[in-house]
Image (tube, grey):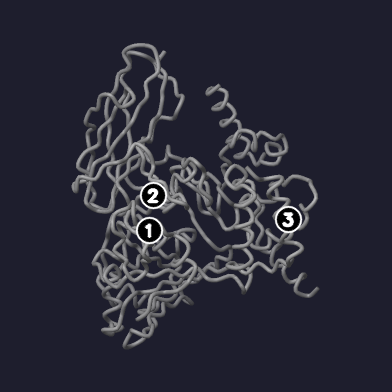
Amino acid sequence: MVDRRHFIKNIASSLAALGGLSLLQRSGLAAATELPIMDTLPGKEALIKQTFRPPNYETPISYFDAPFTPNNQFFVRYHNAVIPEIKTSEWRLHIGGDAARTPLKLTLERLRKDFEQVEIPALCLCSGNRRAAFEPPAPGLQWGSGAMGNALWRGVRLKDVLEKAGIDPSALEVSLAGSDSGVLPTTPDFVKSLPLTKALDENTLIAFEMNGEPLPHWNGFPARLIVPGWTATYWMKHLTAINVISKPLDDFWMKTAYRVPKDRFPSGQFSSQETETHMPITEILINSLITNLVDGQTLPKSKPIEIKGVAWDSGDGIARVEVSTDGGSNWQQATLKQDYGRFSWRQWQLVFTPKHPGQYPIMARATSHSGASQPLEPIPNPSGYHHNAVQKITVKAV
Amino acid sequence: MRTLILLLSLFTATATAGENQIFLKERPGKNQVATQCAICHSLDYITQHATVLDRAGWEKTVGKMINTMGAPIDAADKQIIIDYLAQNYGK
């Protein structure tokens, strides 16, 4: 059964690659088997298409073997469908707001030249990554595990830019807007805010380079916000306006969307947006992913294989990753690979030899330097955020 | 009418090639769904929620599209759209 599913998946990918989507979908296979549809945006390799418009594409897990996710394999996520191609010469970044003393207007050249440049390796993780694994299902894009990527970001500190504009003592939050918009004038723009403390964190950047190249169009050219340790909803792409404000930002994207119940997650560090019961999603939770095995895979018995994966958290750093090959009864410590910094994911590996024929339920569990570890079940929340349960992948040795 | 032409031209201007390969079920209400929902987004948003949303979920979602996202859908079409989605793409 599993083999058949993989067979169909492979056919689906091949057909999609050949532009045979129509044949596939008319045949009814797509709906019946929940196939991943591979599609290629300009400048990208084929990614798993969630939605065409706005474009939402996730990275196949097999691409996560590299410490840094290549730009042309990096996931794409938009809320609104109008995404202008920006010319560097015409782009301006406006810094203002009622709690900024001297509004600024910066060109990309001024941004690059007037402020110290810094580089930070950091994981960009969609709040809803792994939403499709929630049971019961949660509404929202049905992401698998590929709505994330690790990159080396180069830019300038948001703090330095805000200080040049002058921060009034009344400042409470910093709002962020990008150039993308809805199709209709009645659709609200996607605007987010950060608490002032996070905006002034030395790791929060206005980035213009990703892995040594200008940001790809689909990842926010010419400049986007980088908020290491926090989920990607704050990492505003195609930045156009940053406002220092004295009142909490009151829009759908702060007050209704991207929120979690307070009673089951760590403190949100965003008190100006909290109610008695709810808070914005903020810090990434401890998590890991097995990247080179799929459920139902067949392995030759008595032959050593490497189990490989990545682990990450909000910036405490990964202390250890333990792997079980017997469904959680016994755990072995995996080898952690190079440490690129506390906001980067950490690659790990463990050599495993299935000695006898049969089923091997493989699990991986990460623990951070603060002692936080992954739960066995995801933490329920209405919008399906923060899925960080220990995976279980069953392979068969023959 | 002018608004409709403007909207349709916006739609054709922004629809991607791939999304022309999404086929919704041919049942009453499909035209309202295909023309109105697709002004702002591809219809795979609908197909991927077939295992996620029940009738109450679709009612909430269509309400959000009108009240929060500014979709210009009148009350009659709203009901047709909810019925179509609940009957054909409800879990």
Q: Nearer the viewer, mark 3 or mark 1?
A: 1
Residue A278 in picture, x, y percent from top left: 39, 61
Distance in Å between CA atoms under marks 2 and 1? 8 Å
Q: Quadrant of residue A30?
A: top right
Contact flag, marks 2 and 1 (Cβ < 8 Å) = yes
Specify the quadrant that holds the C terminus of chain A. top left
Q: Which residue, given by chain and number where applicable, does mark 2 sit on?
A: A386
* Circle 2 chain: A
Could you tell me how far apart the alpha carbons at marks 3 and 2 are, in whole angstroms?
33 Å
Q: Tag 3's secondary structure?
A: helix
Amino acid residing under circle 2 = His
The CA span between labels 3 and 1 is 33 Å
Q: Which residue position is annotated with label 3? A: B34
Residue A344, placed above or below residue A98: above
Q: Quadrant of residue A235?
A: bottom left
* Nearer-N-terminus badge (2/1): 1
Give the residue furthest to the front.
A276
Residue bearing the label numbered 1: A281
Q: Secondary structure beneath disc 2?
A: loop
Residue depicted at x 59% and y 37% = A34
